């Protein structure tokens, strides 16, 4: 395993236009763009800067994408860490990784620090099952103390994502920590069509492809599933040596993607 905190060198800037649907979530996150662009303006007025934002929603609904888009819109560096990586680290490393990651983000402020799968370390303390659980608590405690330790003026916005807000340690949700909550939902039909439009944009599509029909036939698909669907359709087309993605490629792809989705549903570990 490499470094826990990765600053991304983005090849193409992600913007809110890449996030289809999720209008409420976009609106709430967009409020931070102005702050990140000019934190001093807020500081001069003595305004308390926003600190931690929790993005909640099922897998593949665009939480990571939205955090990246905020960085892209504001033109600030994006530091990305997956909390589940901490679990795989050597004992004693988690807390110091958290520290260095926050230091790095502060050095490059204004910046965004994104913690994916917060629930992997952010579960209620004392509810683990032995083993590495002290380690996890130390890592969690370090996150809490870093969030408390921000000097008022440091323009680091911490975003965290979870699909299990119910298991989070309440200490994470206290004022000054992850006290703003933004929900992302599975897309409805109109949002699915909008997402399909984003992912069909750079692909050669045949005249018989109707994104509205595809959207109607994909209830329960997340944004990630829909992206996968368009990609599988392109692969099906390439396999035939075709040069335009036709509706039958999409149909074939949908069967594949749905099979994958069912598998995920049946083997998902639950506690
Ligand atoms: P997880 O909880 O599994 O980490 P997530 O909510 O962070 O998922 P993303 O990683 O952002 O989801 O989504 C994966 C990919 O799916 C995105 O990079 C994007 O290509 C596509 N996608 C998801 N949601 C949307 C959306 N609303 N609009 C456009 N594309 C989307």
Image (spheres, rainbow, N blue to C red):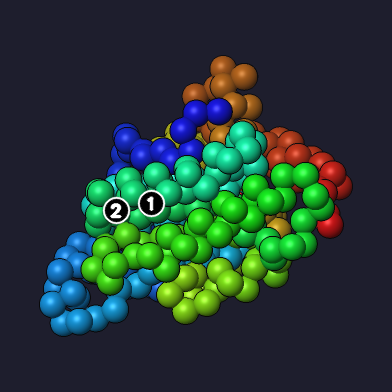
State left or right for residue 118 relative to residue 41. right
Q: Nearer the viewer, residue 95 or 239?
A: 95
Q: Nearer the viewer, residue 216 or 92?
A: 92
Residue 149 location, x and y as percent? 38, 65
Q: Secondary structure at mark 1?
A: helix
Q: On the rendered image, what quadrant is the C terminus found in?
A: bottom right
Q: CA distance from mark 1 to mark 2?
A: 6 Å
State left or right for residue 166 relative to residue 39. right
Question: Is the residue 167 above or below the residue 102 in the image?
Answer: below
Q: On the rendered image, what quadrant is the N terminus found in?
A: top right
| Callout 2 crowding tier (Cα within 10 Å): few <14, some 14–19, many ≥20 | some
Q: Residue at x 48, y 38 (%)?
A: 4
Q: Residue at x 15, y 69 (%)?
A: 40
Q: Residue at x 80, y 50 (%)?
A: 130
* Circle count: 2
Residue 2 location, x and y as percent? 50, 28
Question: Is the residue 258 above or below the residue 154 in the image?
Answer: above
Q: Residue at x 32, y 60 (%)?
A: 156
- The answer to whether mark 1 is within 8 Å of ligand 1 is no
Quickly name the residue at label 1: 102
Question: Is the residue 36 above or below the residue 255 in the image?
Answer: below
Quickly name the residue at label 2: 106
Residue 111 location, x and y as percent? 29, 54
Q: Are marks 1 and 2 in contact (CB under 8 Å)?
A: yes
| Callout 1 crowding tier (Cα within 10 Å): few <14, some 14–19, many ≥20 | many
């Amino acid at each position: 395993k490499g470094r826990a905190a990765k600053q991304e060198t983005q090849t193409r800037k992600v913007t809110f236009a890449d996030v289809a649907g999720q209008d409420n979530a976009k609106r709430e996150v967009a409020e931070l763009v102005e702050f990140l662009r000019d934190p001093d303006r807020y500081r001069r007025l003595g305004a308390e800067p926003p600190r931690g934002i929790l993005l909640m929603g099922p897998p593949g609904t665009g939480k990571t994408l939205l955090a990246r888009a905020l960085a892209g819109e504001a033109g600030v560096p994006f530091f990305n860490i997956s909390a589940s990586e901490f679990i795989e680290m050597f004992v004693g490393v988690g807390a110091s990784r958290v520290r260095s990651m926050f230091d790095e983000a502060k050095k490059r402020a204004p910046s965004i620090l994104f913690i994916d799968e917060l629930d992997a370390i952010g579960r209620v303390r004392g509810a683990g099952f032995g083993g590495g659980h002290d380690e996890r608590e130390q890592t969690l405690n370090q996150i809490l103390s870093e969030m408390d330790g921000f000097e008022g003026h440091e323009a680091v916005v911490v975003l965290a994502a979870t699909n299990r807000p119910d298991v989070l340690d309440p200490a994470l949700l206290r004022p000054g920590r992850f006290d703003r909550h933004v929900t992302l939902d599975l897309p409805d039909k109109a949002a699915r069509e909008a997402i399909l439009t984003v992912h069909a944009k750079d692909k050669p599509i045949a005249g018989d492809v109707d994104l509205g029909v595809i959207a109607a036939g994909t209830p329960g698909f997340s944004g990630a599933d829909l992206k996968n669907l368009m990609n599988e359709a392109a692969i099906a087309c390439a396999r035939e040596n075709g040069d335009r993605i036709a509706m039958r490629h999409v149909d074939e792809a949908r069967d594949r993607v749905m099979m994958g989705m069912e598998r995920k549903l049946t083997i998902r570990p639950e506690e």
